[in-house]
Amino acid sequence: MAELTWRGVYPAATTQFAEDLSIDHDATAGVQDALIRDGVDGLILLGTCGENNSLEPDEKRAVLARARENVAGRVPVVTGVSELTTSRAVAFARDAEALGVDGLMLLPAMVYVPTEEELYTHFKAVAAATSLPIMLYNNPPAYRVSISARVLEKLADIPNIVAVKESAPDPRRFTDLINIFGDRYVLMAGLDDVALEGMILGAHGWVSGLTSAFPQESVALVAALQRGDIEEARRIYRWFMPLLHLDAEHDLVQSIKLAEQIMGRGSERVRLPRLPLAGERRKQVIDMVEKAAATRPIGPK
């Protein structure tokens, strides 16, 4: 069984839908298989790109059950925990552990903007409900709350809260957190277009959106950085950057799934309230992906 090390490339894998927008479990398994074959170090399921909040509770659990069978220990599987209330998050964390996932990516409770004490209490309650290692997800632009150093200080004595996915657009956060906490928390780069900066500054790995469309380049970028070849990492990153900016946009899920479709790795179908890209925005993303595909620095053109 693969060990969860929080190192390397962990794509935020998509959930695939059939034409009637039911979950296509075979296609979802195919996406996971292709990413594993291309060398990723783990999978994040039911994150933003997995459309967690567009799935019913039983559907989420079905996705995890199928993933356990399909992945079969080849790489670690981490699931997003993204619920409206703390009690629902606790229940989902318990069920995810029973279904055999390797770790949790824990988000603040959805919709409601908490105080720091409420945020701390939410994270503490979920951590107490499971023995799984937990990565907190800090994304202030998306969730309107920042996991401050004060909150992390209060959480520091909870042993299974081990990592932070840092998706604030300011890479200074990596240095600030390392200066404050040392190696208490593993940091993961979580915003694609500051990923290289984050890893240079001390992040152990990359939770990536655009890896779903271009996994070979993502793996090669991190491998170059790990062996100290900054020039090669920078070369790949500069090629990748126009696409990586898509991860910071409100329509990132539609853009990433459209990129997957163009690259023959999945379908662009999304569930309401999202709609597939249309008009000028669709043309813009198609042009970007096709240009990237024609100039790939690693994978087949």
Image (spheres, rainbow, N blue to C red):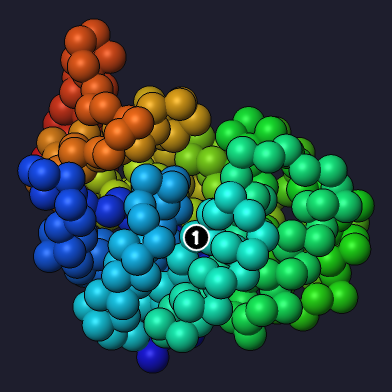
Residue 60 against residue 93 in the figure, above or below:
above
Q: Quadrant of residue 130?
A: bottom right
Amino acid on which disc 1 is placed: Gly
Circle 1 residue: 80
Kindly identify the residue that appears in the image at 81 percent across and 61 percent down: 121
Residue 23 in picture, x, y percent from top left: 20, 56
Q: Callout 1: helix, strand or loop?
A: strand
Kindly identify the residue that appears in the image at 23 percent across and 8 percent down: 280
Kindly identify the residue that appears in the image at 90 percent across and 56 percent down: 180
Residue 102 against residue 27 in the figure, above or below:
below
Image quadrant occupied by the N terminus: bottom left
**Residue 223 visible from this viewpoint:** no
Rate crowding at label 1 as few (under 14), some (14 to 19) or many (20 or more) other CA atoms within 10 Å.
many
Which of the two residues, 123 or 56, is positioned nearer the viewer here? 56
Which of the two residues, 164 or 40, is positioned nearer the viewer here? 164
Residue 25 against residue 297 in the figure, above or below:
below
Residue 42 in picture, x, y percent from top left: 40, 69
Q: Quadrant of residue 159?
A: bottom right
Task: State the residue lying farthest toward the bottom.
Answer: 1
Kindly identify the residue that appears in the image at 25 percent across and 45 percent down: 213
Residue 172 in picture, x, y percent from top left: 76, 39
Image quadrant occupied by the C terminus: top left
Residue 288 in picture, x, y percent from top left: 25, 23
Q: Quadrant of residue 220?
A: bottom left
Classify residue 301 as left or right of residue 85. left
Q: How many tags in the picture? A: 1
Which of the two residues, 166 or 274, is positioned nearer the viewer here? 274
Residue 88 against residue 249 in the figure, above or below:
below
Task: State the residue lying farthest toward the top.
Answer: 280
Classify residue 237 as left or right of residue 174. left
**Residue 150 visible from this viewpoint:** yes
